[in-house]
Amino acid sequence: MGTVAELNNQQNVSAELFGEKARTAFREIRKTPTALRNQILLDAASELEQPRVQQELLQANEKDLNQADALGISEALKERLTLSTSRIQSMADSLREIAAFPDPVGEIILGRTLANGVKMVQKRVPMGVVFTVYESRPNVTIDVGALCIKSGNSAILRGGKEAIHSNIALHTILAGAVERHGLSRDCIQFVSDTDRQFMFELLKQSGTIDLVVPRGGEGLIRAVSENTSIPVVKHDKGVCNLFIDDSAPLDRAAEIAINAKLRRPSVCNAIENLLIHSAFSHTPALLHRIKDAGAILLGCERTSALFPEVSPIQDAEAEYSTEYLDQRLAVKIVDSVEEAVDFIDRYGSGHSEAIISDSQSSIVQFRESVDTAAILVNCSTRFHDGGQMGMGAEVGISTGRMHVRGPMGVRDLTTTTYVLEGEGQVRS
């Protein structure tokens, strides 16, 4: 199992060399057969299931948790940081699921014979070198590494210092499986130097790195986006909203709201704002159930009038646009679907927006008006997740528009190329 000390010599390796090694490894892995890439993932899954390995991973994670308070890590991030045997098993399950997917590499998207007899196809090919910067969640090391291997890409992984021991231990497992199958460990490189300046140096390597994927807080996303000329797929904060229409059944509204907020408040697809139609006749009962389930409710003046137990919103601009990642839930009474959509456009982050309604006209209006990565109708926002949506895992959930929106899976780590075959034709 890897240690921080074993990788400390990376600090003497330039960011330029990191990129060059990744580019060389990409030329190697992009040519490998599907069966080999799948077997790497299956071997890593088997290793994750070994009791000895799980114990070592938990010990590494304990080192990170022990230093969390000294680093000023919030409870929400600490929850994301925590490993357990069930979470380790989930990683193994994801590896097997990804291995079972059809290989997108080589898929023919378009094929035809041109008028001059030249045969042309457009097919999927690996993206190249993918540099992922992430915070807190150690499972990202496995998820992104596995998706890159499956899609024939080379990965550079840079986690935060709060998860350094966990990340190195998980990377060792994946890189070891790569190496055992005759490929260079440089196919999956991990950056042990947690100094931000080294990250900025890597962001300058546009000659060797093809795509940057930042996953984390607003500050990290901004720092990455403002300091690179490499294309960036943003996996930004999740200010997710749930709208309760006036036709919504109370039981359904309560069950979904509680699940969407409280099942795991620290994740990006948990709701932060609850919008309730002013004509919904069960608002006090709904808020009572949500509060009893453990939510800390904040509300507008109209909410307070209906349910005095909420804490008043002091600064709407700040509080409705905040990703709390804890038990706090901001409530707003609105008079129409249009007002709910206006609120979402103003305060939401384009991540996940949901409606609970028995009115098909309200559902259609909401669905056609909201601009977001995922629209959820009569179900929890917690389903906006690569694993839940049948992708095995995700690089992250893209809140931008290019080149993918929503969970970024194995297919989204490919691009296309054209192949034209002739019999001596020349252009006149």
Image (tube, grey):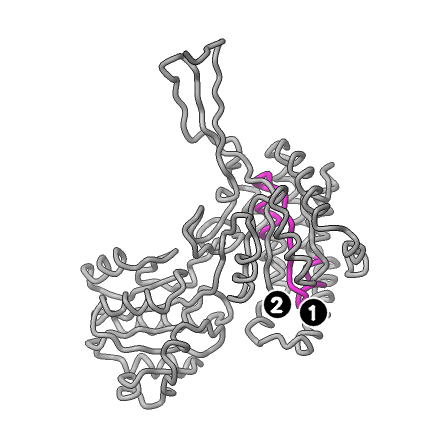
Dot label at residue 64: 1
Please say if 224 is above or below 308: above
383 on left or right of 244: right
| Quarter containing the C terminus | top left
| Quarter containing the N terminus | bottom right
Q: Which residues are magenta?
A: 143-169
Q: Is residue 259 visible?
A: no
Q: Which of pointers 1 and 2 lies earlier in the amino acid sequence?
A: 1
Dot 2, how many residues are within 10 Å of its Cα: few (below 14), some (14-19), or many (20+)?
Answer: many
Q: Is residue 421 visible?
A: yes
Q: Quadrant of residue 345?
A: bottom left
The answer to if 166 sits in the magenta stretch is: yes
Predominant SS of the magenta segment: helix
Distance from label 1 to label 2 (Cα)? 8 Å
Q: Which residue is mark 2?
A: 81
In terms of depth relative to the viewer, which is nearer, 182 or 396? 396
Looking at the rendered structure, the kind of residue marked 1 is Asp
Please say if 2 is above or below 82: above
- Residue 56: percent from the left, percent from the top? 74, 62
148 on left or right of 293: right
419 on left or right of 329: right
Q: The residue tagged with tag 2: helix, strand or loop?
A: helix
Looking at the rendered structure, the kind of residue marked 2 is Leu
Q: Quadrant of residue 278?
A: bottom left
- Residue 257: percent from the left, percent from the top? 37, 72
Q: Residue at x 64, y 57 (%)?
A: 200
- Residue 309: percent from the left, percent from the top? 36, 89
For the residues labelled 1 and 2, say whether their Cβ atoms are less than 8 Å apart. Answer: yes
Q: Quadrant of residue 78?
A: bottom right
